[in-house]
Amino acid sequence: MIDVSLTAPLAALAAAVAAGATVAAFEYRDEPGGLAAVAFMAAILWWSAGLFGEAVAATEAGKLFWLNVQYPATAVVPVAAVAFVASYLGYDAWLSRRRLLALAAPLAALTLLSWTNEFHGLVRTGTDLVAFGSGTVLFREFGPAWWAGWLYSQLLLVATFATLAYGVYDSASAFRASAGLLLVGAGAPWGAQFVVLGGGPAFRPELLFVLTGVAFTVAVRRGRTLGVTPVARQVTLKAIPDPIVVVDRSGRIADTNPAARAWLGDDVAVGAAAADALATAPEVYAAYRRGEAPDKPLRIEVDGEPRFVSLSAVSLPTLGSRSQGTVLLLRDVTESERNRRDLEVANDRLQTLTHALAHDIKNPLTVADGFTDLATAGDEAAIERVEGAHDRIFEIVDETLAAVDHPDPDDDAESFSLATLAEEAWRTAETGSATLAVAGDESYVADRAAVRSVLENLYRNASVHAGPDPTVTAVALDGGFAVVDDGPGIPPVERDRAFDRGRRHRDRPRLRRDARRVARVDRRRRRGPRRGRRRLAPGRSRRRRRRGVRRGLRRPTDRSCRGAGRRRPGRARHALGAARGREVVDSAARRPDCPGPTRRRARRRRPR
């Protein structure tokens, strides 16, 4: 047995160490498990102080008094240990005030029975003051209530230590040292009692509270046990291929998985501040600070390559009304994002094809239809107009197919004259009684076919909306050009919505009189063969401006081979062939470097 003269100094030392540990725990009282840790160490302080009083007492009555003083601490320690470990390992959702009071009730009853033992003898059936060495010790014979309370305490402590041991095994490596210190420090006095009960050296196991206080203080001060809370591994499974980052309520990294470290770098370390750990992924940190996941995928750099992730934020279980932290789940959606963008490109190509069918082809078809009767009558000028319209139809088909198959905007950029192209577009556009004028001439580098399509559509719009006998002028500007007509303009309240995507033609505002409309195309490149930035230009006229027509549509054959070997559909071409007395096949089909003739069945038009 330990010398009686050493019991009092060791008990005083245990009380002093427990007091320091209580102060250290109090600094982290707002952290998960902080209040339970304060209660645990304060109870050990109380217990050690009572043991010191019992050791220095000289009479049996004095020793019994200090023994009873220790019993409230014996009721608090097991329950506080359960609460601390549950909060520390993230199981605090199970805890409630009612459950804690229910756990403490049997031990509180044992405390009451100890203070009233002289009336019933359920805790101690007998006591005696025995001389040992230079001092005296209190010898006790335990009653049934003491054994029942002891067994109940052991159940609580066994569950506590088993859970803590699992936490040591299942936590991140950075937490194992701290959790191991807590396990050894709290388990030392608990294991010593079995040595004494088994017939080993007789001493008070409570004296080992010195180890408990030291281990707890080191874990709190050096390992920041209460500052960073470990989370069970079932939350951050190593098998999950997507990055997972756990941020505690104080904004520090609580846990990560290997995928997170591979994606975000070694700075994502346990205990590091989230702002520093996520410095390489500012979008992820910004979403974490906002407290909500973004609607769109985030773009981050992984080994110098862009990746797209879908971020989800899952809140950890709360202790009362206090959040315990957030789990950031980053799901790799790079492939789906690429597929989505490819789908957008495909939709753009479909829009290009739809635009060609709805607008571009309509202009030359209208011209061909309007001059068919004159061509049938033998008018050479009308025949030339019909032939040019049909050539333009084949060009539009080839250009549209090329734009769909090869959407590179730069391949077919070429220099062209505004005056020449404006007159060519006028001949294949539905212009009615309108008159064309060209103001100035400049050369531009752009996709000639796309610009011509824009001009044709603008000419047609002017002839339809600009009133009777309008004058349409192609104007050369600095860095671009404009198309102006002297017809009605757009109401001011409708101008901002004039070019809304998806706005149907009949929903667009009608043009006002005494105003002019301008469409401008410059050399800025944008995606889409006929897409651009359009706006109404201020000034004396109400002008409509279209910027950035895409340059360059890759064509599969040489320009001179376009439409080679194709029969011209429609009755107008048959009239042209009959007038000239030859088969209607393009001369380019006879060139050796052009594709062979492709015969198409002519679609007969219904007579009007």
Image (spheres, rainbow, N blue to C red):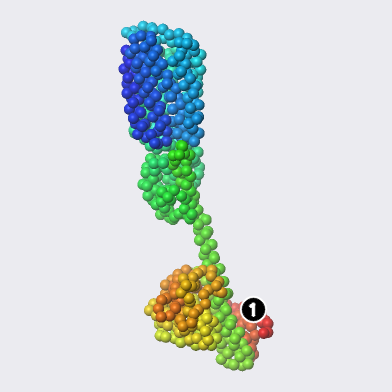
Camera-side residue of 382 and 546 = 546
Q: Quadrant of residue 401?
A: bottom right
x and y percentages locating residue 235 in the rendered image:
49, 40
As drawn, 182 above or below 468:
above
For image coordinates 52% across by 67% down, the residue present is 348
Disc 1, SS: loop
x and y percentages locating residue 121 in the rendered image:
48, 11
As drawn, 249 above or below 560:
above
Q: Name the kind of residue labelled 1 in the image.
A: Arg
Camera-side residue of 541 and 388 = 541
Camera-side residue of 189 and 48 = 48
For image coordinates 34% across by 18% down, the residue present is 11
Mark 1: few, some, or many residues within 10 Å (few <14, many ≥20)? few
As drawn, 456 above or below 94:
below
Camera-side residue of 555 and 355 = 355
Q: Is residue 452 something one can see in this rendering?
A: no
The residue that label 1 is drawn on is 600
Q: How many marks?
A: 1
As drawn, 13 above or below 58:
below
Q: Quadrant of residue 139?
A: top left
For image coordinates 42% across by 30% down, the residue present is 36
x and y percentages locating residue 529 in the rendered image:
49, 72
For image coordinates 49% across by 80% down, the residue present is 512
x and y percentages locating residue 9 in the rendered image:
31, 17
Q: Is residue 70 something one can see in this rendering?
A: yes
